[in-house]
Amino acid sequence: MKAYTDYLWFNTKERQEIINITPQVEAAVRKSGIKEGLCLVNAMHITSSVFINDDESGLHQDFANWVEKLAPYGKDKYKHNLTGEDNADAHLKRTIMGREVVVAVTGGKLDFGPWEQIFYGEFDGRRKKRVLVKIIGE
């Protein structure tokens, strides 16, 4: 079995953004040379997320609205923010949206269902963060 590791780096302009990272992950799969296996994509920061869904802007706005209702931004709302931070909501949003995804690699390509794409969700941006891409297989 072979393993390949790559890192994607992000520094978003906005506090919250959703970015389609499918092309970068597909490039990593091609570079790996792995034809059959698994691809793990993991947000390596506790205020960002990786998830799979449809690449449709209305849906992305729905996600943003939904997580904001569940974990609204506000310094005075959370005990975590008493430590001097203001990002407790981002930690909660990350938990809701997920830490990582695993996608099968078949014939050297990501084996998606219809409309599936991989997204990086940023909830406390404007600083450098990374995503791990780990591909294992033959």
Image (tube, grey):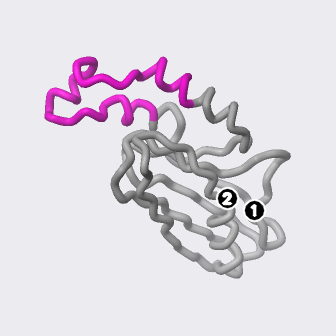
Residue at position x 43%, y 60% in the image: 130
Dominant SS of magenta comes to helix
Q: Position of residue 89 (x, y in %)?
A: 36, 29
For residue 51, what is the image quadrant?
top right
Relative to 61, is 115 on the left or the right?
Answer: right
Q: Which residue is pictured at 59% across the width and 59% down the height?
A: 40
**Quarter of the figure with residue 111:** bottom right
What's the amino acid at mark 2? Thr
Answer few, some or many: residues within 10 Å of disc 2's Cα (few below 14, many 20 plus, some between 14 and 19).
Answer: some
Please provide the residue range marked out in magenta. 64-93
Which of these two is toward me, 69 or 51? 69
Q: Is residue 69 magenta?
A: yes
Question: Disc 1 designates what residue?
Answer: 110
Residue 36 picture quarter: bottom right
Q: Amino acid at mark 1?
A: Leu
Determine whether 1 is above or below 133 in the image: below
Write down the residue under mark 2.
Answer: 22
Q: Position of residue 44 (x, y in %)?
A: 42, 55
Instruction: Tell me the quadrant of the picture where the N terminus can be found.
Output: bottom right
Residue drawn at x 40%, y 21% is 72
Q: What SS does tag 1 mark?
A: strand
Vertical placement of 115 versus 96: above or below?
below
